[in-house]
Image (cartoon, rainbow, N blue to C red):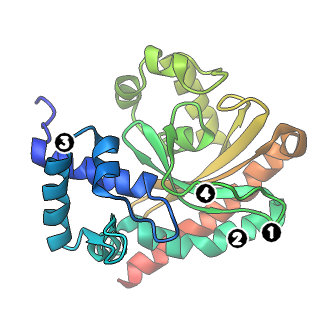
């Protein structure tokens, strides 16, 4: 079956919401119609009508003073009901415990298509806090978290999702460049209970990740630690074992809550 196409009107609205989410500036986060039109590459009049329709439904709201637009209350109301929102709420204490122990940035990731999406992050006091990782997506194949998230997939699915062309360009210094190498790496991950990467995604950066499972035993998220090689490299396997334990504790918490619901 061919992939479903997105209606043009829906695609336009999604582009507008994306622009408001990613490019909002100023203390109130509002963008003018002209700025939104420039960002999405559409006529100002078309964007103005679309924003008015979205505002009527609560998906965006208009600042009464600046007349700029920002994401509306309904976006947040919907987001609060998602699986990711519940997962973040339950996982936050576990992420903070990892940061306290390892003193490196710790994030919670999920898989969305071929990309890794960060849904929560915690950082130690010494970390630079210029840009948060929440909502940021990166190619999954070159990351320890991405590999963890597909480590329970069947071989045909791995080969279909991660082609040699995709693997060859994933990350700054890819070391797993064929489906066969990826399958071997996934076997090691299943045996160890965690994954590691050494400067594959970014020069000078290492990381490790462990799987979080749901009530049915499916991997639904990964806890990841990332840090400079000079600071974390010698402790990478120790950190991997530690977050494997933290991920198991989070899994048990999720399973217990599902059992009570």
Secondary structure at numbered mark 2: helix
Residue 132 numbered tag: 4
The residue mark sitting in front, 1 or 4, is 4
The tag earlier along the polypeptide, 1 or 4, is 1
CA distance separating discs 4 and 3: 32 Å
Give whichever of 50, 163 is nearer the camera: 50
Q: Residues within 10 Å of mark 3 (few under 14, many from 20)?
A: few
Q: Nearer the viewer, mark 4 or mark 3?
A: 3
Check if mark 2's residue and mark 1's residue have beta carbons within 8 Å: yes
Measure the alpha-carbon separation of dots 1 and 4: 19 Å
What residue sits right under mark 2 in the picture?
96
According to the picture, the residue beneath numbered tag 1 turns out to be 100
Q: Quadrant of residue 61?
A: bottom left
Q: CA distance from mark 2 to mark 4?
A: 15 Å
Disc 3 target residue: 43
Residue 75 on image: x %, y %: 30, 69
> Going 35% across and 83% down the picture, which residue do you hit?
261
For the point 16% across and 65% down, the residue is 52
Please report whichever mark, 4 or 3, sits nearer to the chain's N-terminal start.
Answer: 3
- Image vertical order of residue 232 relative to residue 121, above or below: above
Q: Is residue 218 visible?
A: no
Residue 185 x %, y %? 60, 29
Label 3 to label 1: alpha-carbon separation: 50 Å
């Amino acid at each position: 079956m061919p992939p479903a196409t997105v209606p043009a009107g829906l695609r336009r609205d999604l582009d507008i919401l994306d622009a408001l989410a990613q490019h909002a500036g100023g203390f109130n986060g509002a963008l003018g119609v002209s700025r939104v039109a420039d960002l999405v590459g559409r006529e100002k009049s078309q964007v103005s009508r679309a924003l008015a329709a979205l505002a009527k439904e609560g998906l965006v709201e208009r600042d009464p003073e600046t007349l700029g637009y920002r994401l509306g209350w309904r976006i947040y109301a919907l987001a609060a009901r998602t699986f990711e929102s519940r997962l973040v709420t339950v996982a936050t204490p576990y992420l903070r415990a990892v940061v306290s122990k390892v003193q490196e940035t710790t994030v919670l990731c999920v898989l969305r298509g071929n990309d890794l999406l960060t849904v929560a992050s915690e950082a130690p006091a010494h970390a630079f806090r210029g840009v948060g990782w929440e909502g940021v997506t990166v190619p999954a194949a070159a990351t320890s978290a991405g590999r963890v998230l597909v480590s329970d997939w069947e071989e045909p699915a791995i080969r279909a999702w991660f082609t040699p062309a995709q693997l060859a360009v994933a990350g700054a210094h890819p070391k797993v460049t064929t489906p066969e190498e990826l399958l071997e790496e996934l076997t090691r991950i299943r045996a160890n209970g965690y994954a590691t990467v050494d400067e594959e995604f970014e020069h000078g950066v290492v990381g490790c990740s462990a799987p979080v499972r749901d009530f049915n035993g499916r991997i639904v998220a990964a806890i990841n630690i990332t840090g400079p090689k000079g600071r974390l490299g010698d402790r990478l396997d120790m950190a991997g074992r530690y977050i494997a334990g933290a991920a198991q504790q989070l899994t048990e918490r999720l399973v217990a809550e599902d059992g009570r619901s």
